[in-house]
């Protein structure tokens, strides 16, 4: 199930491909283990491997490949700008059970783009051209790219598309915001549709997928081969199965408050390291609660962001979620730019 051949078949399958977005310090082995229990995506992406002249494959990211508990394909993502180092790393990654190798051209974190990596490379199209050419020669399994629509302006996308078209990449994932836009409103789904029309390779739509009904509409309007979901899957791990049900014309099953509470317990059990001080454990969970709370309510989100102790954490969770009412878990108070940058790429 995890082979490049399986991934290639999924790209050609009639059913839309559903993928979990790569999110730094979120899409770990532990988070993958939790998400798979709720249906999970068809394909997982790793956190990005940082690539430079003296880089080595990070062991904790390799764990998500070598110990992949999902039985589904996993794509190894790289970030960097040095061609020899990227080629070296791509060849190393192909020795492991990865379905594809992916290049990150979308991370909007200033610490990344100021080094001309991730989304920062979108300011240098000629450099992207050279990198894609070198990597396509080096990668003998599917080679994919995840991009934003530009650095400062969506108008830059017109110059980027011919570069993506020039190289026989196997999949382009388009996060339809600019790097400067971060995670603010104004997702340009029309540019995803443009890419799907103009490129020979399949295109995945990425950016603010938040409900099954919206996902169905997005697929129809863009012509994308599938969806990559990030924050929405943290908030609502049932979303992948909800989308599948919506596409089949079936009734959507909503989780109850207690279901959400159980999900938070699973995250706690999987994400917390024994022996770490209490305040650090609570802070680690806040990375997830910033997004889960966004689907619970503004008061819950306000309160959970301010807890310092385990006892207060669970008191607030139980007060808000120990009930049997169904919950849609759609965004009520979009995450702030700063919080988004901390968690996502």
Image (cartoon, rainbow, N blue to C red):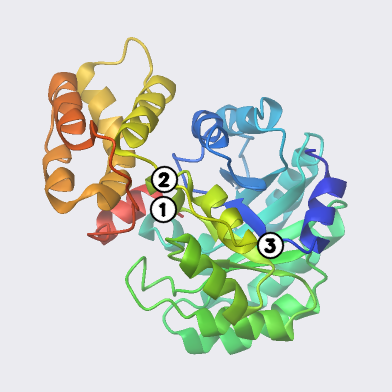
Q: In which quarter of the image is residue 36?
A: top right
Looking at the rendering, in which quadrant would you find the N terminus?
top right
Residue 20 numbered tag: none
Say few, some or many: other residues with alpha carbon within 10 Å of mark 3 (under 14 / 14 to 19 / 20 or more).
many
Q: Height in image: 342 above or below 274? A: below
In this rendering, position of residue 192 left or right of residue 276: right
In this rendering, position of residue 206 left or right of residue 272: right
Image location (x, y in percent) of residue 328: 35, 53
Q: Name the residue under label 3.
A: 16
Disc 3 + disc 1, Cβ < 8 Å? no
Residue drawn at point x = 11 percent, y = 48 percent: 299
Residue 234 numbered tag: 2
Q: Which of marks 3 and 1 is in front?
A: 3
Q: Mark 1 points at which residue?
A: 231
Image location (x, y in percent) of residue 191: 55, 83
Disc 2 + disc 1, Cβ < 8 Å? yes
Image location (x, y in percent) of residue 204: 64, 66
Say few, some or many: other residues with alpha carbon within 10 Å of mark 1 (under 14 / 14 to 19 / 20 or more).
many
Q: In which quarter of the image is residue 304?
A: top left
Q: Mark 1 falls on what kind of element?
A: helix
Q: Mark 2 falls on what kind of element?
A: helix
Foreground residue among 104 and 252: 252
Q: Height in image: 316 above or below 94? A: above
Residue drawn at point x = 60 percent, y = 62 percent: 249
């Amino acid at each position: 199930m995890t082979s490049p051949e399986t991934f290639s078949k999924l790209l050609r399958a009639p059913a839309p491909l559903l993928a979990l977005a790569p999110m730094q310090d979120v899409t770990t082995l532990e988070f993958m283990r939790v998400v798979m229990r709720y249906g999970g995506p068809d394909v997982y992406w790793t956190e990005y491997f940082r690539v430079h002249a003296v880089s080595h494959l990070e062991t904790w990211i390799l764990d998500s490949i070598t110990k992949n508990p999902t039985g589904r394909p996993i794509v190894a993502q790289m970030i960097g700008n040095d061609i020899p180092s990227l080629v070296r790393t791509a060849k190393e990654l192909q020795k492991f059970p990865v379905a594809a190798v992916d290049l990150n051209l979308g991370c909007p974190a200033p610490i990344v783009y100021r080094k001309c990596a991730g989304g920062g490379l979108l300011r240098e199209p000629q450099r992207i051209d050279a990198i894609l050419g070198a990597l396509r020669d080096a990668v003998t399994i599917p080679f994919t790219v995840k991009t934003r629509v530009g650095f400062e302006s969506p108008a830059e996308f017109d110059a980027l598309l011919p570069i993506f078209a020039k190289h026989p990449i196997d999949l382009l994932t388009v996060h339809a915001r600019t790097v400067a836009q971060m995670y603010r409103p104004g997702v340009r789904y029309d540019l995803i549709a443009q890419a799907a029309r103009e490129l020979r390779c399949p295109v995945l739509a990425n950016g603010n997928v938040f409900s099954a009904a919206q996902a169905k509409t997005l697929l129809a309007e863009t012509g994308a081969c599938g969806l990559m979901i990030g924050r929405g899957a943290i908030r609502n791990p049932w979303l992948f199965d909800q989308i599948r049900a919506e596409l089949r014309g079936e009734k959507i099953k909503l989780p109850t408050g207690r279901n959400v509470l159980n999900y938070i317990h699973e995250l706690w059990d999987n994400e917390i390291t024994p022996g770490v001080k209490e305040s650090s454990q609570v802070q680690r969970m806040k990375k997830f609660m910033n997004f889960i709370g966004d689907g619970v309510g503004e008061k819950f989100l306000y309160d959970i962001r301010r807890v310092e102790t385990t006892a207060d954490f669970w008191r607030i969770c139980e007060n808000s979620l120990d009930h049997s009412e169904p919950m849609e878990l759609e965004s009520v108070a979009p995450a702030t730019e700063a919080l988004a940058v901390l968690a996502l790429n």
